[in-house]
Amino acid sequence: MPDSQPQPPPSSPSPGPLSGPADASPLLLCGARLTDGRTVDVRLGGGRIEAVGTAGSLAADGPRARGERVDLSGYLLLPAPSEPHLHADTALSADAGGPASYDPEDVQRRATEAALLQLGHGATALRAHVRVGDVAGLGALTAVLRARRTLRGLTELTTVAVPRLLTGVAGADGLAVLRDAVKMGASVVGGCPDLDPDPTGYVEAVLEVASEHGCPVDLHTDATDPARLSRLAAMAGGLRPGVALGPCGGLARLPDDVASRTADQLAAAGVTVVCLPQGGCAGTERRGTAPVRLLRAAGVRVAAGSGALRDVSNPVGRGDPLEAAYLLASRHGLTPEGAYEAVSTSARAALGLPEVRVEAGFPAELLAVRGDRLSGALSLAYSRIVVHRGRVVSRTSAVREYCGSAMTAEAGLPRQGRGEIS
């Protein structure tokens, strides 16, 4: 359990370009265990992994020995997960007793706290879907962009502009607001075509704006209409830097042969599916998890996100990527390695970020979890140390003690803690 609730940094006056702190001093991670069973030291510098060697081999004298050292004995070292589907504007609003407040100060506070909660879980990169137009106008987006600025150096937060309507007379304003949102700093164009009277026209409008600005596309859909998905795949096939769809729970309710044909079409178009195994979100009407094994077998990149984080769509949402991986393994038949890949490598790819491996030359985006195997880490991932741009940015510690019994000592069972609780 975290020792305390995360506290948001002070507000920044306006959004602007991000530039993280200089990574001047190296960092040495000592005695970490890797998923292949090796115990290693890892030296970080300049935001990247500089070297990986056997335990004790990188602690030699020299200028780099002056850097900070972190003892990771008893920890499993992993590429950090990423969050590809956060609703930052409505996060942490479930207890409000009504619709989420879109007051910019409220949105900025909630978005910042939500990002810090997910950072504590290990996510060093987040993609936040933010409603634009209608009641929200551009105020919520402005607030999330300000939160993004306050979080620089801790985590990377990117925004998806999500208009409600884009077709017909009513959609003209939404289309204008969407273009304004991209000019303001939204780096991804999104939306919910299922909620528009003309879903195909909605997708066409989104793809047009994305093509104009060179932006990725990230759309909400239940994926219950295979013909609509086929048209979307055909339209999206040539778009770069890419198209993501989520949560696509309706694919699991289609006949197997129809779902398989649709998966083949999505794979051919290079579309990424972002599933939400922890629950739904406000952008879709029904819950359910996409058929991840079928999609992966067809060659579709499948990433996993959190969706609703304690808002009306899921008032107990945790926003924990390791829980998403746990559910993919426990409920959907993925191996622990395949499940973790969905929240790490595939999630980073969905966000357009470079791959992370615990090897020299790769970005220093890492998560250390107490344990010695990935299956155990997904089951009981309590203590975590998070590294972003080569710096430790979050620590979560948990201690378990068994009191009033000599059995644990006599049996030689593992124990944490320094004494008896009185």
Image (spheres, rainbow, N blue to C red):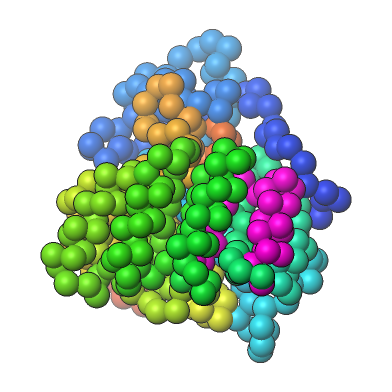
Comparing 2 with 100, the one in front is 100
Q: Main secondary structure of the magenta part?
A: helix
Q: Position of residue 407 (x, y in %)?
A: 24, 71
| Left or right for 399, reference 7 | left
Q: What are the residue bounds of the magenta stretch?
A: 170-193
Q: Position of residue 70 (x, y in %)?
A: 50, 36
Give the residue displayed 23% in from the left and 36% down from the top: 36
Q: Residue 377: within the magenta? A: no
Comparing 213 with 54, the one in front is 213
Q: Is residue 19 above or below residue 54?
A: below
Comparing 318 with 345, the one in front is 345
Residue furthest bottom in the image: 97
Image-quadrant location for residue 8: bottom right
Give the residue displayed 66% in from the left and 59% down from the top: 175
Specify whether residue 289 is in view.
no
Q: Position of residue 264 (x, y in %)?
A: 22, 51
Comparing 253 with 341, the one in front is 253
